[in-house]
Image (spheres, rainbow, N blue to C red):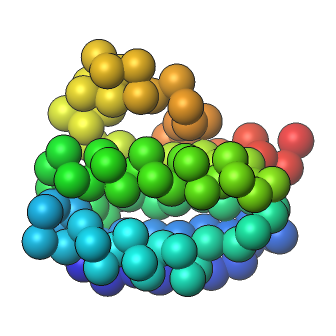
Amino acid sequence: MRLRKELRGGVTVISLDGRLDSETAPGVQQDLQGLFPEDGLVVLDLSETRYMSSAGLRVLLLVYRQAQRGEVRLALTGLAPDVRAIMDATGFLGFFTVVESVEEGVEALTV
């Protein structure tokens, strides 16, 4: 799993590329903590995340909690249909602003 961070108009965009599963989740969680600002706006781009297990969903929950501890507004983009369905069925989707693209996320957070 590879993570990239970039700034777009004052919004931190963190992209995940690869598989988010029980093998990669601990490292991703640690890496995200280092990339995540204490306050501000963050779009988490999952469009290149080819697979996500329940361990990956746990990472998303921890990211949400980290955002809540700080002053971070968070949006998710690029959710695969099966991941979106699981998050919706568990009520997990309601924690996040979910958008269709990074650009939409930047716009949604800066309005």
Q: Decide if residue 41 is on the left or right side of residue 6.
A: right
Residue farthest right in this picture? 111
Is 27 or 16 nearer to us in this picture? Answer: 27
Is 44 or 70 nearer to us in this picture? Answer: 70
Report if residue 60 is visible in the image. Answer: yes
The residue drawn where x is 29% and y is 17% is: 89
Q: Quadrant of residue 56?
A: bottom left
Residue farthest left in this picture? 23
Give the number of marks: 0
Q: Decide if residue 39 is on the left or right side of residue 74.
A: right
Q: Quadrant of the C terminus?
A: top right
The residue drawn where x is 60% and y is 36% is: 97
**Residue 43 screen position, x and y as percent:** 60, 57
Report if residue 107 is visible in the image. Answer: no
Is 4 or 35 nearer to us in this picture? Answer: 35
Q: Decide if residue 105 is on the left or right side of residue 45.
A: right
**Residue 92 screen position, x and y as percent:** 41, 28
Residue farthest front in this picture? 69
Is 75 or 33 nearer to us in this picture? Answer: 33
**Residue 82 screen position, x and y as percent:** 19, 33
Q: Quadrant of the N terminus?
A: bottom left
**Residue 26 screen position, x and y as percent:** 27, 72
Q: Quadrant of residue 38?
A: bottom right
The residue drawn where x is 66% and y is 60% is: 42
The residue drawn where x is 55% and y is 47% is: 64
